[in-house]
Image (cartoon, coloured by chain):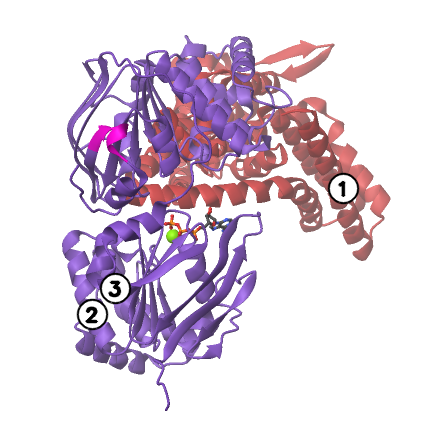
């Protein structure tokens, strides 16, 4: 008797990837994708999803392991080989030429495959008819909304004869209606025999559109399930479960007056979409509020609005009872708020020395009449370095030459030395080693104990659980849950981060 | 900068000079001239008249600053030419009206600043590329200046040039160690030092540097990027205008109808700024060196009967080899920041 095996589109076998800087992104990932499936790949920030897809697309090479595509071992020396084999990729950031029309973009993208312009347009029309994907061929890309641009990318892949389509977090740039439309398109594509790899953080979407799902965590496959047979809870558990690394000494809170109050805050993202949608929040003296959430759910826009870097659309922000909604950030800082951004290249100027960096948020303080008091600034820099254990040759050392941990300590120190009452720390331990991480976390707890209000934004759930007195979860621009830490556990946060509302 | 940086820069400069001289020598040999004699005249020929050398150097020193300061904020001021013309013509008119050299020079400098402001503000607030604006303004003010000189300000005795700056409004000389010197170089020197102070010791200079080095950090620290960009271009224009004003009020005392005493100096300032590592003190040296090569080249034409094209090529080779390492670095970071600004611009 012959057992008929379903034909395989992609088989990953023991894929390891170590980036040149020593970052281990994948640790032996193995799983297979059947032809004609919509296959979900789920995982937290940094789980290795994008890395795996870039390997499949021939953009980077695995450190070890093999990939089979339609039963043949794939040896790609670049994306063009992958494209010829029938793989199409839709990046989160589209690769279209803004000033060209849709038709021109399609023709251009098929040029290396030797498909004639006439042919390209015919194929485009054909596949549009088959799948119901509508794109206006004569419009310029610039004038199209994001959702339509994404369709152009899909059509582009179809014109190039893609059999396997990779979508890396395709919904993160779309409005809810556009997401619905995209799902319709994907279902039609599946009917026509295409295999689709769908990468996401969102549990709801996995349930809504995929046939099967593989969960990645820290570069390893945590399991593969038929979507119908798995609950959101189980997926969340697979995504976030781990051992706690170390614990922190913390005294019970004695919260005081509210220092930061946010009411019905609405903020738009860089691309003009609503990123923060009606957030309410209040932090009291002596309290750490941790905001968990997958990156890109409005956290950045939220904290930038509070610190005055970004203008909110609606709502009010009060600092120590004073309305600061319309103030510029330098004024907000002077009134006692400090913001430690997640990008060190934002909070520090890498190409100038430590003293100059001290002035970044404290310029007025050290130049009362417009002339900078360098001697005073040097002294203050030295004291910050001493207080916060910043290791550097001298105050005149370029910040670029410091290790990440020392950069972070200096940035934190500079802000704390201003004696702010409210501290917003965004991913304060990202990329730091264990020692530096522990140091930074202890400092945040110290601040809380001395009666400051701390707003912690982190994608690291351990950090959130360890440090916060209260926890909130941000999902698609809203705080979908808020409460004391004891009401949360990893599992519950995992579900909430994936957009599943759970009753307490 | 720390010791290591200084060591690296001096090494870079020494290497560049040697490489430049070597190529220049090879060119001389290939074209059949004595390379030793040629390079000797080229490097020393300008030293004969120190006052003349330093005065000439002052104009490119100032246009060098005009380019260098905006460059710190990643603004590309190639409008030094137009700013010089405007500075010159406005200073001339002001001198005729007020008969006061200082008022005339100030007026010229402000006119240059206004031009820089327009160029910068158009870029910052209306997204009109400052390079294109500057090129257009250079030509517009070239012809406007000529129009004024030939239509209203022409000298009845010598119609190819303007009337002279009135005696009382001509900036005179000082005597240093028995040498009579124009006041131009001391003023340019002073401007350089003030600029140094402005860049490294004041709030405005700090903001300009941060905005140029890292737009993200500028946003974070609350620096108004558009205003800083415009400020830097305005200051650049001020130096360009000053250069033109000094040229007329303290050196030639008139303008000829083809602006021969100014044409090209605005662009020369770019080379001077790059050779001087975009640093107001470095630019003092590079401006003098630049003028040395220029005047030495002229001497060489006469002494060795070398065509002008060849001496220009030789000084070009030396200047390029000196400016290249820095120009490359600047260009790379400029392109990077432009890309970032574009992304930011699209998003706001
Ligand atoms: N070019 C790179 N060089 C070095 N390390 C990298 C590089 N790209 C990714 N990494 C690291 O590899 C790990 C996996 O990253 P990857 O982008 O694949 O995660 P992801 O699952 O796509 O995350 P996200 O949900 O945030 O997109 C992370 O720790 C990341 O920091
Ligand atoms: Mg990714």
* Residue stretch rendered in magenta on the structure: A482-488
Q: Say the numbered circle drawn on residue B300.
A: 1
Residue at 56 percent of width and 19 percent of height: A389
Q: Quadrant of the N terminus of chain A?
A: bottom left
Crowd around label 2: few <14 · some 14–19 · many ≥20 (10 Å) = some
Residue B52 pos. (x, y %): 66, 25
* Count of marks overlaid on the render: 3
| Chain on which label 2 sits | A
Taking the view exactly as shown, the residue that stands out farthest to the front is A1
Q: Secondary structure at mark 1?
A: helix
Q: Is residue A492 left or right of residue B327?
A: left
Residue B292 pos. (x, y %): 70, 33
Q: Secondary structure at mark 2?
A: helix
Q: Are marks 2 and 3 in contact (CB under 8 Å)?
A: no
Residue under label 3: A210
Q: CA distance from mark 2 to mark 3?
A: 10 Å
Magenta span includes A487: yes
Letter of the chain shown purple in the rendering: A
Q: Say the numbered circle drawn on residue A161.
A: none
Residue under label 2: A187
Nearest the camera: B97 or A354? A354
Nearest the camera: A173 or A115? A173
Nearest the camera: B283 or A98? A98
Residue at 16 percent of width and 52 percent of height: A176
| Chain on which label 1 sits | B
Q: Is residue A269 left or right of residue A333?
A: left
Q: Quadrant of the C terminus of chain A?
A: top left
Letter of the chain shown red in the rendering: B
């Amino acid at each position: 008797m012959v057992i008929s095996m379903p034909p395989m589109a992609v088989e990953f076998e023991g894929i390891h990837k170590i980036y040149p800087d020593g970052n281990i992104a994948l640790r032996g990932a193995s799983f297979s994708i059947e032809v004609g499936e919509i296959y979900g790949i789920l995982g937290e920030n940094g789980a290795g999803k994008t890395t795996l897809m870039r390997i499949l697309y021939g953009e980077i090479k695995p450190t070890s392991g093999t990939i089979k595509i339609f039963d043949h071992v794939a040896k790609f020396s670049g994306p063009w080989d992958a494209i010829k084999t029938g793989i199409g990729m839709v990046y989160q950031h589209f690769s279209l030429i803004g000033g060209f029309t849709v038709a021109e973009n399609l023709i251009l993208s098929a040029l290396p495959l030797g498909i004639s312009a006439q042919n390209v347009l015919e194929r485009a029309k054909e596949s549009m008819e088959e799948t119901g994907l509508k794109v206006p061929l004569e419009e310029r890309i610039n004038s199209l909304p994001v959702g339509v641009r994404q369709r152009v990318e899909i059509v582009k892949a179809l014109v190039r004869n893609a059999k396997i389509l990779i979508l890396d977090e395709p919904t993160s740039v779309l409005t809810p209606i556009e997401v619905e439309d995209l799902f319709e398109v994907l279902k039609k594509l599946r009917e026509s025999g295409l295999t689709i790899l769908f990468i996401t953080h969102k549990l709801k979407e996995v349930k809504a559109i995929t046939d099967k799902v593989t969960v990645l965590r820290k570069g390893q496959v945590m399991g593969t399930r038929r979507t119908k047979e798995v609950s959101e809870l189980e997926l969340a558990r697979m995504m976030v479960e781990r051992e706690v690394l170390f614990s922190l000494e913390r005294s019970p809170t004695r919260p005081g007056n509210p220092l930061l109050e946010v009411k019905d805050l609405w903020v738009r993202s860089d691309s003009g979409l609503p990123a923060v949608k009606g957030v309410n929040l209040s932090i009291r003296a002596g309290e750490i509020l941790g905001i968990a959430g997958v990156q890109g759910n409005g956290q950045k826009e939220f904290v930038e609005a509070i610190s005055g870097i970004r203008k909110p659309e609606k709502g009010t922000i009060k600092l120590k009872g004073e309305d600061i909604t319309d103030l510029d950030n330098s004024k907000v800082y002077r009134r006692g708020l400090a913001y430690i951004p997640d990008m060190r290249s934002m909070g520090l100027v890498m190409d100038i020395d430590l003293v100059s960096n001290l002035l970044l948020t404290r310029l007025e303080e050290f130049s009362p009449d417009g002339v900078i008091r360098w001697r005073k600034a040097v002294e203050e820099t030295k004291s910050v370095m001493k207080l916060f254990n910043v290791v550097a040759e001298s105050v005149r050392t370029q910040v670029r030459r410091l290790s990440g941990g020392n950069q972070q300590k200096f940035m934190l120190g500079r802000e704390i030395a201003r004696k702010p009452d409210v501290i917003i720390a965004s991913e304060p331990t990202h990329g730091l080693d264990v020692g530096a991480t522990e140091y930074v976390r202890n400092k945040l707890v110290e601040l809380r104990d001395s009666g400051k209000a701390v707003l912690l934004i982190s994608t690291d759930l351990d950090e959130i659980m360890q440090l916060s007195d209260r926890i909130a979860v941000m999902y698609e621009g809203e705080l979908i849950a808020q409460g004391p830490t004891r009401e949360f556990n990893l599992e519950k946060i995992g579900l909430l981060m994936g957009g599943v509302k759970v009753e307490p | 900068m720390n010791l290591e940086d200084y060591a690296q820069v001096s090494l870079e400069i020494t290497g560049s000079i040697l490489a430049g001289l070597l190529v220049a020598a090879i060119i001389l040999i290939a074209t059949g001239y004595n390379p030793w004699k040629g390079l000797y005249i080229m490097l020393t020929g300008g030293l004969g008249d120190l006052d003349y050398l330093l005065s000439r150097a002052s104009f490119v020193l100032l246009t060098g600053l005009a380019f260098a300061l905006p460059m710190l904020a990643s603004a590309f001021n190639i409008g030094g030419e137009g700013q010089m013309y405007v500075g010159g013509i406005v200073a001339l008119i002001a001198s005729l009206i007020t008969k006061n050299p200082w008022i005339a020079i100030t007026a010229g400098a402000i006119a240059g600043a206004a031009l820089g402001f327009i160029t910068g503000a158009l870029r910052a607030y209306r997204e009109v590329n400052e390079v294109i604006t500057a090129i257009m303004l250079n030509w517009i003010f070239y012809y406007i200046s000529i129009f004024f000189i030939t239509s209203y300000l022409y000298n009845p005795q010598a119609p190819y040039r303007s009337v002279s700056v009135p005696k009382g409004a001509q900036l005179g000389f000082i005597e240093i160690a028995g040498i009579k010197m124009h006041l131009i170089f001391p003023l340019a020197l002073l401007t350089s030092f003030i600029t140094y102070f402005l860049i490294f010791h004041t709030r405005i200079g700090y903001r300009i540097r941060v905005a140029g080095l890292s737009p993200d950090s500028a946003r974070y620290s609350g620096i108004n990027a558009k205003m800083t960009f415009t400020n830097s271009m305005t200051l650049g224009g001020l130096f360009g205008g000053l250069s033109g004003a000094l040229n007329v009020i303290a050196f030639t005392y008139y303008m000829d109808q083809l602006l021969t005493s100014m044409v090209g100096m605005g662009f020369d300032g770019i080379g001077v700024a790059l050779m001087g590592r975009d640093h107001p003190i470095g630019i003092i040296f590079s401006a003098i060196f630049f003028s040395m090569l220029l005047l030495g080249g002229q001497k060489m034409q006469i002494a060795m009967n070398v065509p002008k094209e060849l001496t220009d090529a030789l000084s070009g080779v030396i200047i390029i080899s000196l400016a290249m390492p820095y120009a490359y670095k600047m260009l790379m970071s400029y392109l990077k920041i432009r890309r970032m600004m574009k992304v930011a611009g699209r998003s706001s």
